[in-house]
Image (cartoon, rainbow, N blue to C red):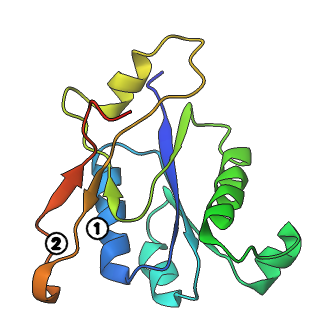
Amino acid sequence: MPMRWGLVTTTNAPLAAVQAFVAHHLSLGADRLWLFLDAPAPEIAAAMAPHRAVKVIDTDAAYWDRKGSRPDMHQPRQAINARHAYNRSKRLDWLGHIDIDEFLWPEDGTLADQLSSLPADCLVTRVRPVEALSPVGGGDIRHFKATPIDRK
């Protein structure tokens, strides 16, 4: 059986950025993408509805009431959302968390092949995404940055 992987992200990005993230990672073979909307965005939920591999969660007041309360800082919200997705992703072999402006970019083979090559007892791995840079003048994103390999 092929390696199954997915991603989780918490976002308040505009629809075009979400569509780019989803299209890119589905094209890489993601089996599941969890999009936690940090602000109301019904247009995103509507645009993603046809994609069975994409799960959109509105983190509205009712969501945070079920979680206890909404943390002020986005990092704890990301962690809570990632845990929510992890607890519901039992059919995945790997679940990663990246920001909406980050993109996985496997250089050799597929991401599933790279994850399959890890030792069976490996529970966590570090993946270096490339990150979209803000476009000059509000145009299309054309430049990205990657974390240097030698960075500790």
Q: Is residue 58 left or right of residue 49?
A: right
Q: Is residue 39 left or right of residue 136?
A: right
Judging from the image, what secondary structure is the residue with disc 2 in? loop
Q: Find residue 50 and report its horizontal and vertical position in percent.
A: 44, 70
Q: Find residue 99 and report its horizontal and vertical position in percent.
A: 44, 60
Q: CA distance from mark 1 to mark 2?
A: 10 Å
Q: Nearer the viewer, residue 7 or 70?
A: 70
Query: How many numbered discs sit on the rendered protein?
Result: 2
Quadrant position of the C terminus in the picture: top left
Judging from the image, what secondary structure is the residue with disc 1 in? helix
Residue at the location (28% across, 44% down)? 147
Type of the residue with mark 1: Ala
Quarter of the figure with residue 66? bottom right
Q: Nearer the viewer, residue 58 or 11?
A: 11
Q: Mark 1: few, some, or many residues within 10 Å (few <14, many ≥20)? A: some
Q: Find residue 80 and report its horizontal and vertical position in percent.
A: 72, 59
**Residue bearing the label numbered 2:** 141
Residue at the location (21% across, 54% down)? 145
Mark 1 vs 2: CB contact within 8 A: yes
Please identify the residue farthest to the front as the structure is shown.
152
Q: Mark 2: few, some, or many residues within 10 Å (few <14, many ≥20)? A: few
User: Is residue 137 positioned above or below 31 on the image?
Assistant: below
Q: Find residue 8 and report its horizontal and vertical position in percent.
A: 53, 55
Residue at the location (40% across, 65% down)? 100
Type of the residue with mark 2: Ile
Q: Which mark is residue 20?
A: 1
